[in-house]
């Protein structure tokens, strides 16, 4: 597992070759949304090719609405689920 | 008490308050204060609960329009206005003892536009409007609590230039009519029916494309369409019992006045905004006239709006607690706290300049086609755009790459 931390203190982990995880729990909105959109934009080619998927952990219910909406509008496949007290948003899959 | 619309409820409260005061005259006044307080708390709790469960953030709706070009939630704000418009018109036609339009609305002035613009900037920087800040703070957001402090500070700052601003407002007032129907010399009904027709067409289109429903994995999620209807019900409930839409911003100024009056030096007594009682408020149910002021004294503002403020925060907290999601959110960069305080201050000041907040004008003024509310909205849009620009470029530029 390759752990990464960005300048804003957000932890991310590279789990194998396919899943990059970002923990944006506890962060305030809309910086959480913009952080997610920036990462989606940074990895858009690799997401499209199926090389990676992004996983965001967030405890903000609003993020569970807006991040999937925005990522869908960018043409990515999105799934949202609950994991205990927070949400898992996975972006990646077939490009439409 | 014979002219009251709901004698059973009022009689009950009256009998209780007669025991408290011991005399009839004071009892009727106490009845009104009790009614305002209990009603305000209930309205506040419902509002905070509904908004927290549905993510109904008015500031976020306008911010997302400019930051990520998303109008999902704005659609439901539009429907709140439509539902409210129908309810308000039904009450007007029903003959209930409600003054239409509420005398708290004034004729339009350019100041509504300027105030709306400043409010829009502040609302986006604060991360929530005057109501959103409360339910988010109640659910544990310390950034929103910082914005709440800014709201009180900004409202108190307004008192420093109130006389100048009021003279400019009067000079910039360009009509003696409060609403568009009055301006056109027609009844509101045709405009309400036209609005219903347009919204029906839009709703059919949105229904076909599945945009009237929002899918969320959040526990206890309240569909925004239901929230829009419920918030319109809260609004009409407020109008029937208090004679005016839901509002909280005069109470922010009053809180500022109380804090300022505790500071030695007596500065607050020299401020016209805090010392003059500018209005008499008449409750439509009891017919009792009470003082309505921003000054540091107990009056109708304190009786009604303080419970609304604490009710909204309590409603947000209650919703979060029931979902077992309550916790303090504080992990934010310092500049976001600074942004919340600056935004809250701007919003508090602007809400006195307009006067009125976004909930007051969008959910209370627009449904009756109040001219000053339309001007407020016209100012709010460029303000929210500018606020979004500042937010992305300065406040959270390290966190995201999108530009408004």
Image: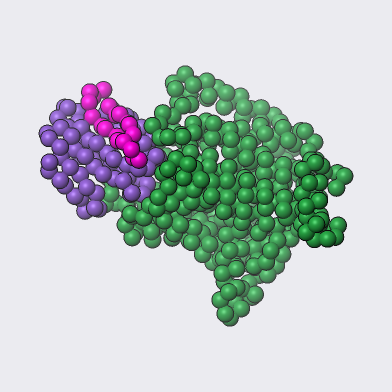
Quadrant into which the C terminus of chain B falls: top left
From this view, report whether residue B259 is shown above or below residue A5.
below
**Residue A58 horizontal/vertical position (percent):** 32, 41
Tell me where residue B71 sits by quadrant: top left
| Chain B, hue in figure | green
Total residue callouts: 0
State the residue lying farthest toward the front.
B19
Colouring scheme, one of rainbow, by chain, secondary structure, one colour: by chain
Which sits in the foreground, A2 or A66?
A2
**Residue B11 horizontal/vertical position (percent):** 81, 46
State the residue lying farthest toward the right.
B2
Q: Is residue A73 left or right of residue B146?
A: left
Residue B296 part of the magenta segment: no
The residue positioned 72% from the left and 32% from the top of the image is: B90
Residue A79 part of the magenta segment: yes
Q: Can I make out residue B281 in this image?
A: no
Tell me which segment is drawn in magenta: A77-96
Tell me where residue A43 sits by quadrant: top left
State the residue lying farthest toward the bottom.
B265
Q: Can I make out residue B12 in this image?
A: yes
The residue positioned 58% from the left and 42% from the top of the image is: B46
Q: Is residue A52 left or right of residue B159?
A: left
From this view, report whether residue B264 is shown above or below residue B326.
below
Q: Is residue B140 left or right of residue B306?
A: left
**Residue B117 horizontal/vertical position (percent):** 50, 51
Q: Is residue B338 left or right of residue B235?
A: left
**Residue B33 horizontal/vertical position (percent):** 73, 55
| Chain A, hue in figure | purple
Task: Name the chief secondary structure element in magenta.
Answer: strand
The residue positioned 56% from the left and 76% from the top of the image is: B263
The residue positioned 69% from the left and 63% from the top of the image is: B298
């Amino acid at each position: 597992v390759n752990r990464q931390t960005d300048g804003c203190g957000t932890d991310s982990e590279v789990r194998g070759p396919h899943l990059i995880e970002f923990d944006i729990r506890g962060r305030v909105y809309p910086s959480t949304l913009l952080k997610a959109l920036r990462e989606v934009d940074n990895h858009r080619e690799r997401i499209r090719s199926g090389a990676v998927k992004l996983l965001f952990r967030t405890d903000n219910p609003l993020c569970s609405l807006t991040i999937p909406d925005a990522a869908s509008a960018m043409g990515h496949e999105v799934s949202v689920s609950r994991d205990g007290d927070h949400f898992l948003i996975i972006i990646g899959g077939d490009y439409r | 008490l014979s002219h009251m619309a709901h004698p059973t409820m009022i009689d009950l409260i009256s009998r209780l308050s007669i025991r408290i005061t011991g005399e009839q005259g004071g009892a009727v006044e106490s009845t009104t204060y009790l009614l305002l307080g209990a009603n305000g708390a209930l309205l506040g709790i419902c509002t905070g609960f509904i908004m927290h469960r549905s993510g109904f953030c008015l500031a976020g709706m306008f911010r997302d329009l400019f930051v990520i070009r998303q109008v999902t939630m704005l659609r439901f704000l539009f429907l709140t206005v439509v539902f409210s418009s129908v309810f308000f018109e039904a009450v007007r036609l029903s003959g209930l003892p409600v003054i239409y339009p509420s005398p708290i609305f004034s004729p339009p002035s350019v100041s509504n536009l300027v105030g709306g613009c400043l409010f829009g900037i502040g609302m986006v920087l604060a991360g929530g409007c005057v109501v959103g800040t409360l339910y988010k703070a109640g659910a544990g957001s310390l950034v929103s609590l910082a914005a709440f402090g800014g709201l009180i500070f900004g409202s108190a700052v307004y008192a420093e230039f109130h006389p100048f601003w009021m003279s400019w407002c009067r000079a910039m007032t360009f009509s003696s009519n409060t609403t568009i129907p009055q301006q056109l010399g027609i009844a509101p009904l045709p405009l309400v029916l036209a609005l219903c027709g347009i919204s029906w067409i839009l709703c059919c289109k949105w229904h076909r494309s599945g945009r009237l429903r929002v899918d969320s994995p959040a526990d206890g999620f309240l569909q925004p369409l239901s929230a829009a209807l419920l918030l319109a019900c809260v609004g009409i409930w407020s109008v029937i019992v208090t004679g005016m839409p839901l509002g909280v911003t005069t109470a922010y100024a009053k809180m500022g006045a109380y804090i300022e009056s505790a500071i030695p030096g007596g500065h607050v007594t020299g401020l016209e905004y805090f010392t003059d009682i500018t209005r008499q408020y008449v409750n439509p149910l009891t017919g009792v006239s009470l003082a309505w002021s921003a000054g540091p004294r107990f009056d109708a503002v304190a009786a009604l709006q303080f419970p609304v403020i604490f009710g909204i925060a309590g409603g947000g907290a209650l919703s979060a607690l029931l979902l077992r999601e309550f916790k303090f959110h504080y992990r934010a960069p310092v500049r976001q706290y600074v942004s919340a305080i600056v935004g809250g201050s701007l919003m508090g000041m602007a809400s006195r300049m307009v006067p009125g907040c976004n909930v007051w004008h969008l959910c209370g003024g627009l449904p009756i086609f109040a001219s000053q509310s339309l001007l407020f909205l016209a100012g709010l849009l460029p303000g929210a755009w500018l606020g979004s620009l500042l937010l992305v470029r300065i406040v959270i530029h390290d966190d995201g790459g999108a530009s408004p």
